[in-house]
Amino acid sequence: MVRTLLVRGLLLGLLAGLIAGGFAFAFGEPGVDSAIALEEAHAAQEAPGHDHGEEALVSRPGQKAGLFLATGLYGLAVGGIFALVYAGLRGRVGPRSDGGLALAAAGTAFVAVILVPFVKYPANPPAVGDPETINSRTLLYVVTILVGLAATAIAVATARRVTAGPWARWGAAVAAFLVPVIAAWTLLPTVNEVPEGFPATLLWQFRLASLGTQLVFWAAFGVLFGWACDRAARRAAGVPATAASPG
């Protein structure tokens, strides 16, 4: 069963990654082009006659084609990890149906791994951020991911301990999740390296496109994985998709 889930997660993760890549290409790449143009214009002002584009190791067309490779590989990796986690959760926590559990797990993963870090440290386009602080910024981002995962585990454990009705369980779970998350947002240092004069509209278009790409990936993957799991469960129960009618 675990092997079947793993293969399913890898294949559907790849497909969801390509779907997300299409979204990023349509809605994110125009913002990247604009940000690069701003960066090159700024470099030209500082060093007249210097062609900033000659320093690029990969051309923009190559980068755009590589976008689908990157999102596809991301989908493969995430799909495999998700399938293993799903196999551990199946029958223990969450909704009873396989499809419901897949959707709930995908939604929870999006909130814990994507939304929690994004609120504190949103994505920035090219020309934003000091290259010398990339290691510290990456470490802070990873810390927020760990906080989101830990908060999720605390919320699940809290919900399982509450014996009252569903509203009480949901309320306790949400409170248990928000307390460590809000504490981390408050205590972790703020990173603001947006240069003065950078267009706010362009900045937030890029950030929303980045968040939207992740939302599209997790929504597509959750739906696809859930549908495949429900279909496999019906087949295992002897309910084929095209059952022959009597007579």
Image (cartoon, rainbow, N blue to C red):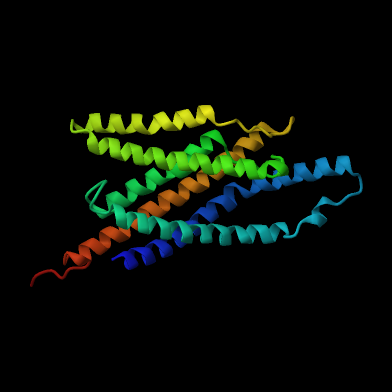
* Residue placed most toward the observer, 206 or 152: 152
Furthest toward the bottom, the residue is 247
Specify whether 244 is left or right of 185.
Answer: left
What residue lies at 31% left-to-right and 40% top-to-bottom? 156
**Viewer can see residue 226:** no
Count how many numbered circles sit on residues in the image.
0
* Residue placed most toward the observer, 94 or 141: 141
Q: Give x and y (percent) for residue 142.
A: 53, 44
**Viewer can see residue 7:** yes
Q: Give x and y (percent) for residue 185.
A: 51, 30
- In the picture, which quadrant includes the N terminus? bottom left
What residue lies at 53% left-to-right and 28% top-to-bottom? 187
Q: Is residue 32 above or below residue 15?
A: above
Furthest toward the left, the residue is 247
Specify whether 11 is left or right of 67.
Answer: left
- In the picture, which quadrant includes the C terminus? bottom left
Q: Give x and y (percent) for residue 132.
A: 72, 43
What residue lies at 82% left-to-right and 51% top-to-bottom? 52
The image quarter in which residue 60 lies: bottom right
The image quarter in which residue 136 lies: top right
* Residue placed most toward the observer, 28 or 119: 119
What residue lies at 22% left-to-right and 49% top-to-bottom? 96
Q: Give x and y (percent) for residue 47.
A: 89, 44
Specify whether 197 is left or right of 100.
Answer: right
Specify whether 233 is left or right of 49.
Answer: left
Q: Is residue 152 above or below residue 54?
A: above
